[in-house]
Amino acid sequence: MMQRRDLSMILAGSALGSIALSSKAQAACTPPCFPLTPTESAPTIVDYQYPPGDVRRYGATGNGITNDQPAIQAAINAAPAGTVVFIPPHVAGAFFKLNNGLTITKPLRLLGAGAGQTTLNAAGLASGAVVLDIDGTVHPNLEFVELTGLTLMSDNNSPDLLRVNRASNSAFRDIGLHNGRYGLVITGNRTFSNTYDRVICVNTSLNTAVRFLNYTGGGHHTFIGCGFLGGYGLIIESDSSVVGLSLTSCTFEATTFEAIYSNGLVQGLNINGCRFEKCGGSSDILIDPAVGKSAAGITIQGCFFETDAAQYVVQFGGSGSTVRGFSIAGNYAQDYSSGLVRLNGEGESGAIVGNRLQNVPAVVNAVRPAVLVANNENQTGKLGASWQPPLVTPTYTVANLVVDRSYDVSATSTAELARVLGSLIADLRVAGLVK
């Protein structure tokens, strides 16, 4: 087990200058004792045996009964920018109870003992409240926030569990998000270049795991090995514009509605090596930009799709705005009643190639301009190719040519060979094969 003195080596507060403990604090502390730092306020310190940055120093118990929100927030407030706040394992069978939400407004590393060991449980928070708010509106251009090894949850499915607002170049690793209205809300106009690694969102059946809401912050959001379970897996609302979104080796499982639904602007969406299993809705992926929005640069490759409800794996368009430039290649899909792709409305300019289907009757519902469909197959064998405008091999009949020509194939004289060659060239011109 990590000793308090060992833990102090990673908590930035322990490296700060300090002042002497009061005589009362000294009498109450069994050495080693960690004195008050310049960033701390004496009334917030409960136990000087824990180093600065450890939430137990400020009174957190993790017993599931005491309201630990004031202690954890005090630790966050006292930590200098760029340092660590540590939340240890809670009492076995319990959690850190929060009667109010927590807020981070500076570069900070919030470190738990593991998603299954450090659980923050919001008690009675109202709809629209946030359990943990990464808020860059207080000090603009917030960067380099890191959350590791935590579970956030609520007892009533009402609050948003984690909100990232105007925070960039930040990382979220080994995070559990359970039973909130929304698991992760990404919002604001400077929220970009963030990484979400093994973030597992499990929400109630009518709510959403990840939501881009009122988001105009650019993009470059990378999800790696994440899990999305809930009403919807991931939504990009019509008020949002996302430039660069990558989902790699993620799982979408048993969503009530679409696994991925985008109604906003998307430029650059890469879905690679993901698993979609028994998701609801008419399709697993619905890219349907609202009027005035568009979607472009969409790649879906190397994914596994299985359903017992959806008609299509992917649907592009339907609301009247454009979807352009897509590649759906090298995927496996099973048990979709209507087909692999539905091109509804403005789904054009792309390629659907090299996919293996099982119990999927068709590749695509309609031929659209500049959409190549080729080299796909299902259990019956290879499926036909299509292209719009259609690929046509010209054919020429005798009526196209000057008829009644006779050629002496044994001709040897230069004059006879020249006459034959001239006649052939004339015929080719008539056929339109040479000018």
Image (cartoon, rainbow, N blue to C red):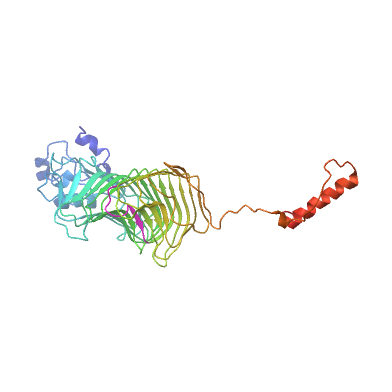
Residue drawn at point x = 72 percent, y = 57 percent: 400
The location of residue 374, given as percent across then percent down, is 51, 47
The answer to whether residue 346 is above or below residue 15 is below
Residue 365 left/right relative to 24? right
Residue drawn at point x = 51 percent, y = 49 percent: 385
Does the stretch in magenta take in 76?
no
The location of residue 306, given as percent across then percent down, is 34, 45
Q: Quadrant of residue 137?
A: bottom left
The location of residue 231, given as percent across then percent down, is 26, 54
The answer to whether residue 105 is above or below residue 114 is below
| Residue at the extreme top of the image, as rendered | 1
Residue 1 left/right relative to 143? left
Q: Is residue 203 visible?
A: yes
Q: Nearer the viewer, residue 136 or 420?
A: 420
Residue 32 left/right relative to 225? left
Residue 262 left/right relative to 435? left
Q: Is residue 13 visible?
A: no
Q: How many marks?
A: 0
Q: Nearer the viewer, residue 211 or 148?
A: 211
Image quarter of the C terminus: bottom right
Q: Quadrant of residue 236?
A: bottom left
The location of residue 430, given as percent across then percent down, is 75, 57
Q: What are the residue bounds of the magenta stretch? A: 252-263
Q: Nearer the viewer, residue 272 or 119?
A: 272
Q: Nearer the viewer, residue 159 or 142?
A: 159
| Residue at the extreme bottom of the image, as rendered | 292
Image quarter of the N terminus: top left
